[in-house]
Each structure stands twice: as C-alpha cells, then as structure tokens.
C-alpha cells in the first residue's frame, strides 16, 4: 500500500489552494461554476473533470471540520491521561505496600505471645489455661496476610483506574495514527483522489471510527470515577472527617456528570453535550417519561376501581441525532416568534462582537430583508412585539437614520423609497407601530427602553431633517415627517436658536418642503417662533427670494407682522438690515410699509453701509434722504455727526437710478416662482 503515497497530491487539497480559510471552512460562498471552467463535451466525468474538483473542495470542508474535532478530543485526552496516570501511580505506590506481608506486625504478635508464655511459666499456669481471646492474632506467622478487605478494595480501584487511564492514552495514540492514515497524501488526478478519499471515508463509517474516538473520553471518565471511589475508601481508614469531604466531592461530581449527560436531551440549547452519549440521554429521558405515564395510568385505573382503562398518551422514543433535533428546534416553524428571536439574536451578536465596521452595513441589510420576509408572511403583530424588546432594531434605526442623513440630496426620487434598502428598513420598522391603535411612531419611545435611547433616536431624526432641509431633499423630508408623526412637527432643528421646523425650512430656502408642510397642514403658516419671528422673517433674513414669494402668495398679511424685539422689525426691515435688496424690493412691491428711518439706521452703522453700496441701494429703492427722524435729523446729519464723511458724501451727491415697478426691470435677475 505504500506505493500509493509517493506523490504529494493529497486526498484533501491544501486549504491554501482555495479561497476559503480555516475560519470559514464549511461556508464556501463562491460559485463553483465560476471557479472551475466547464468541461468539454464528453469529458464531464474524466480524470480532471470539474465535478471531481468540486467534490474535493467539499470533502476538504467536511474532513477539516470532522478531523479537527477528533484531533482536539485526542489531544485533550493525551494531556489529561498523562497527568492523571502520574497521580494514580503515586497513590498506587503508597497503597500497594499494604498488600505485602507486614513483618513488623508479625514480629510484634510473636513477641506478645512469647511474653504471655513467660508470664504463664512464672505463675505456674498451664498453656491451656491462657485465654485464646487475649491474643486474636496469635495465628500470625511469617508469610501470613496482614492486609484487610478495605486494602484490597482500595488497591483494586486504584489499579483498575490506572489501567483504564493508560489504556485511554494508548488508544488515543492509535486514533491519531488512524486519522493520519485517513488524511495521507495520495497520487493521481482529481478523479483518483476523489475516489480514494471516498473509499477511505466509507471505511470510517463502516468501522465506526468516529464512535470509537468519541467513546475514548468515557473510558477516562470511568477511570476517574473508580479513582474517586478508591480515594474515599482509602481516606476512611485515616480520618472520618476527611473521608466525609472526599465522599461529598465524589457524590457531587457524579451527580453533576450524570446531570450534564441528561440535560442536553431536555434542553437542546444546553452546551453540556457529548454527541456520542446523546442517544443514551434520550433513552434515559424516555424511561423517565414512561415511568411518569405508567404511574399516572395506574393511579387513574386504581381510582376507577379497575373498571375503566384510562386513555393515556404514551411517550415515543426519539431516534433523532443531536444535529437533527437541534435543526428541528430552530427551523421547524419559520413563523414562530422563537425562530424570529434566534435570527435577531444571531444578527445582534455579529453586530456587537465584530470590530469590522463594514459588518454594520451588511447586518442591517440583513435586517431589512428579515423585516420584508416577516411582512410577506403576515407576521407584523409578532414583529412589533419583538422589535419593541430587541436592541437590534434600535441599532438598525440609528444606523439607518445616519445613512439617510449622509445620502440627503435634491436628486432623491420617490422610487428610492421603494428600492433603497435604508428607506425600506425604516419603513418596515415604522409600519407595525403605526398600525397599532395608539398610532406610535419613531419619534416616540416605542422602540427604545430607556429615556437616553429615545433621545438618541430623536437626535438622529433631527439631524436627518436638518440635512434634508439644508440639501432640499423633499423626498427624505416627507418620509421623516411620516415616520415621526405625531410629534415631529414640533421639533426644533437649529440647536443654537431653537428654530421651529417651518422657520428653519424658510431660513434654508427649502420651498418645496414648505409647500408640502402647508399643503398637508403639518404646521401653521402664521406660526411665531423665537422673538416673534415668522417664516417670512427668516426667509427675508437669508435672502431666500423664492421662499419669500411662496410665503407671501399664501399669506400676504405676514408682510406687516413685527417681531417683539427691542426694535420691532417687519420682514422688510429684516431684509434691509441684511442687505437683501431683491427681497426688499419685492416686499415693497407687495405693499410692505416703508420704514422711514431705515437710512438713519444704516448710516449710523458703518458695518451696514459698506462704502456706500447699501445707502445707494436704499436710495434706488425710494428712501428719502431728506426725511427727519424724531430728533429732527436727516440721514446726512447723522452721517456728519458720526464722522462718516464717505456716507455723507454719498447721501449728498448720489443720483438715484430710475427704477421701474418690481419684476419689470429688476436690479438683479430675480427668479419668480412659477415662471
């Protein structure tokens, strides 16, 4: 047979030759049709056909997993058996001395008997008059057995334990050699290696290699059990308290050991499992249930006076392997809440215990698919219950809101809500809560367990709203408004000035978003915010002409609303003070009241008139340079009094431009909404 092993081509190809690593054995994710090119017609089963390469790849996954498990068992056994044998040998060397004749004891007995004889001679007592009970060991002589039955039992247990331990070590070494023989390299092409590998594999099944290796620990377990029993007997000759402690430890160990054998049959998720003993544990559990039913049957039959035979549902002996039972426990009912819980726990584990940041996106894409599957299966009621309890969905919401904030763009289309995985994920999370009678939303605390978690979600919703308004993404804004209703319409988005939603949109010039909110009556156009400002004030402040036009078209009376600051300001005042003259000219054309002291105010502040450009713009818009304020001063007087010679010169000599009515010949190009 040695001639078969001259080549270095192995039964199991080296893992380095495949894209998978040991960490991913059994989880090949590539497409074999892409990895291996198609065979020529008629060569689909030849020596180097693709099917044999695929077989060898799958065999590598299987054998690496199984054989690595066997090697782990054997290596552990060898280490423990070596240490344990050394311990038992020490005890055997000590206790085995009790089985040899105790010549010191024989000598002492003979001396005692000699002393009694001398005493009898001195007292003129005959030999027959000496009581035999005074010397129970008088029959001892050289070569007599001086050990007790306890000594025999102790040594019997210790020697047996040592023999089993050494036998386990020997069998473990043999098993390693068997595994080595199974994985030995063979020559030939893919077909040859595949067939030889399968020949060997069938041999391992036929000759129970796996069962033998898995039973080796049981021999060592028996060796330890016998040693503990012998140790308890040994200590009983030395001290009762010490013996009591050893017996207690031994009993506890036995009970724990037996318990761990039975528990996996009762609770499949119990990790105290030995696959080889699982059928035995099932048998023990079946016997227990059978006795329970038999007792119940006899009791009911006895109560009926042995007249009516009770109807009982007798237990059935399960013939499933552990893997089959485990698979049924998880996958038997895909719609069960427990199955859904397993999936969520699995995804949450990889999310928490991986330091790879790319994991998050992959996991949350999986969550989106999971929610879609639940929805298609009609599990939304169970879904809402699970989502309200599991942290996976809260983390999904946080990640998705952050993603949507990054993606905010004016080019976002309505189709993105249907096809984009992040839109879909939040939609699937939101819908079950929305359909509840109380109409919960993401803005509330439905999916958060603590106040800080709820506030974290609200903070990210605000951030996403901020990005949607700033980047004029009306599609994202509408979705956020829907997901957060009710309550989100009262959100304050500008952290510094606590600006309401409508005002912030006006400040950023998000005209479409304002139209959506007003058309759907989300907010009131007459809403007053900080210092009595309206949305028109904010739009005029930031020179958002389109937004100003949209607001005035809806509510023209806002032109005359003043703030409650120390100097009450209209939207026109705000536009003038910020140098937004296109807005100012539009408001004037719409009937805004011209503030007579605007030139006085601008002239008194150099930062506002900026080398006369503001003054010239106001003069062009029709402000009178000769009007007097409450103190009887003209703007020219204010300029000279303040030492602003350049401003005074501009006021005295600038010739105003001929300005036509608004939107006929504008100072600067004005985009009028709707044109």
Image (cartoon, helix red, strand yellow):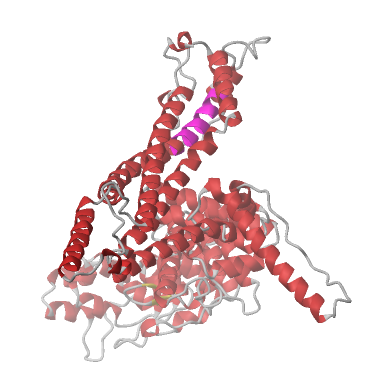
Front-most of 673 and 278? 278
The C terminus lies in quadrant: bottom right
Provide residue 367's location: percent of width, then percent of height: 54, 55
Identify the magenta region.
55-69
Q: Quadrant of residue 313?
A: bottom right
Residue at the limit of the structure toward the left, as seen here: 643
Above or below, comparing residue 496 to residue 193 in the picture: below
Front-most of 422 and 259? 259
Provide residue 566's location: percent of width, then percent of height: 29, 88
Provide residue 446's location: percent of width, then percent of height: 53, 74
Provide residue 2's location: percent of width, then percent of height: 45, 11
Residue at 42% from the left image edge and 9% from the top image edge: 6
Q: Main secondary structure of the magenta part?
A: helix
Residue at the limit of the structure toward the right, as seen here: 307
Residue 62 belongs to magenta span: yes
Residue at 43% from the left image edge and 54% from the top image edge: 351
Front-most of 220 and 311? 220
Above or below, comparing residue 258 to residue 568 in the picture: above
């Amino acid at each position: 047979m040695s001639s078969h092993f001259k080549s270095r081509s192995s039964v199991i190809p080296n893992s380095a030759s495949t894209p998978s690593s040991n960490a991913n054995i059994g989880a090949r994710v590539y497409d074999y049709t892409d990895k291996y090119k198609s065979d020529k017609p008629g060569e689909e089963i030849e020596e180097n056909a693709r099917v044999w390469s695929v077989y060898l790849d799958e065999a590598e996954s299987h054998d690496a997993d199984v054989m690595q498990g066997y090697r782990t068992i054997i290596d552990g056994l060898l280490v423990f058996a070596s240490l344990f044998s050394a311990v038992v040998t020490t005890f055997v060397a000590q206790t085995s001395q009790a089985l040899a004749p105790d010549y010191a004891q024989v000598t002492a007995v003979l001396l005692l008997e000699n002393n009694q004889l001398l005493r009898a001679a001195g007292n003129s007592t005959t030999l027959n008059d000496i009581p035999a009970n005074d010397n129970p060991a008088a029959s001892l002589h050289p070569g007599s057995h001086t050990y007790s039955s306890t000594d025999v039992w102790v040594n019997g247990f210790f020697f047996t334990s040592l023999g089993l331990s050494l036998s386990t070590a020997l069998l473990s070494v043999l098993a390693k050699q068997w595994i080595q023989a199974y994985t030995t390299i063979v020559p030939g092409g893919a077909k040859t290696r595949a067939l030889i590998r399968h020949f060997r594999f069938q041999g391992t099944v036929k000759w129970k290699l796996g069962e033998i290796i898995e039973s080796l620990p049981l021999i060592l377990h028996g060796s330890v059990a016998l040693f503990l029993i012998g140790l308890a007997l040994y200590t009983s000759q030395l001290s009762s308290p010490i013996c009591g402690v050893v017996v207690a430890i031994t009993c506890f160990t036995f009970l724990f050991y037996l318990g761990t054998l039975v528990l996996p049959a009762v609770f499949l998720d119990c990790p105290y499992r030995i696959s080889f003993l699982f059928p035995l544990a099932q048998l023990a559990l079946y016997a227990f249930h059978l006795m329970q039913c038999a007792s119940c049957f006899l009791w009911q039959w006895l109560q009926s006076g042995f007249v009516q035979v009770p109807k009982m549902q007798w237990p059935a002996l399960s013939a499933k392997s552990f893997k089959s039972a485990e698979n049924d426990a998880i996958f038997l009912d895909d719609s069960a809440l427990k199955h859904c819980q397993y999936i969520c726990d699995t995804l949450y584990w990889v999310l928490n215990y991986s330091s790879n940041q790319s994991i998050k996106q992959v996991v949350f894409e999986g969550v989106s698919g999971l929610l879609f599957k639940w929805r298609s299966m009609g599990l939304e009621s169970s879904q809402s219950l699970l989502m309200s309890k599991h942290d996976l969905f809260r983390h999904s919401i946080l990640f998705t809101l952050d993603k949507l904030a990054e993606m905010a763009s004016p080019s976002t289309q309505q189709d993105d809500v249907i096809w984009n995985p992040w839109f879909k994920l939040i939609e699937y999370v939101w819908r079950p809560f929305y359909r509840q009678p109380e109409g919960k939303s993401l803005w509330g605390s439905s999916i958060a367990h603590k106040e800080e978690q709820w506030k974290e979600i609200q903070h990210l919703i605000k951030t996403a709203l901020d990005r949607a308004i700033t980047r004029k993404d009306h599609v994202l804004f509408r979705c956020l408004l829907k997901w957060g209703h009710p309550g989100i319409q009262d959100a304050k988005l500008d952290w510094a000035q606590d600006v309401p939603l409508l005002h912030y949109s006006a400040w950023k010039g998000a005209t479409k978003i304002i139209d959506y909110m007003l058309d759907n009556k989300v907010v009131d156009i007459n809403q007053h915010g900080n210092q009595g400002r309206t949305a028109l004030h904010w739009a005029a402040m930031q020179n958002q002409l389109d937004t100003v036009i949209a607001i005035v078209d809806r509510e023209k009376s806002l032109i005359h609303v003043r703030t409650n600051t120390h100097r009450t300001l209209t939207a026109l005042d705000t536009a003038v003070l910020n140098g937004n003259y296109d807005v100012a000219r539009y408001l004037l054309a719409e009937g805004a009241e011209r503030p007579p002291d605007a030139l006085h105010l601008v002239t008194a502040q150099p930062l506002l008139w900026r080398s006369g450009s503001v003054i010239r713009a106001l003069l062009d818009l029709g402000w009178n340079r000769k009007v007097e304020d409450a103190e009887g001063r003209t703007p020219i007087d204010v300029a000279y009094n303040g030492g602003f010679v350049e401003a005074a010169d501009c006021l005295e000599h600038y010739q105003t431009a001929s300005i036509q009515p608004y939107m006929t010949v504008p100072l600067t190009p004005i985009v009028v909404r709707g044109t």
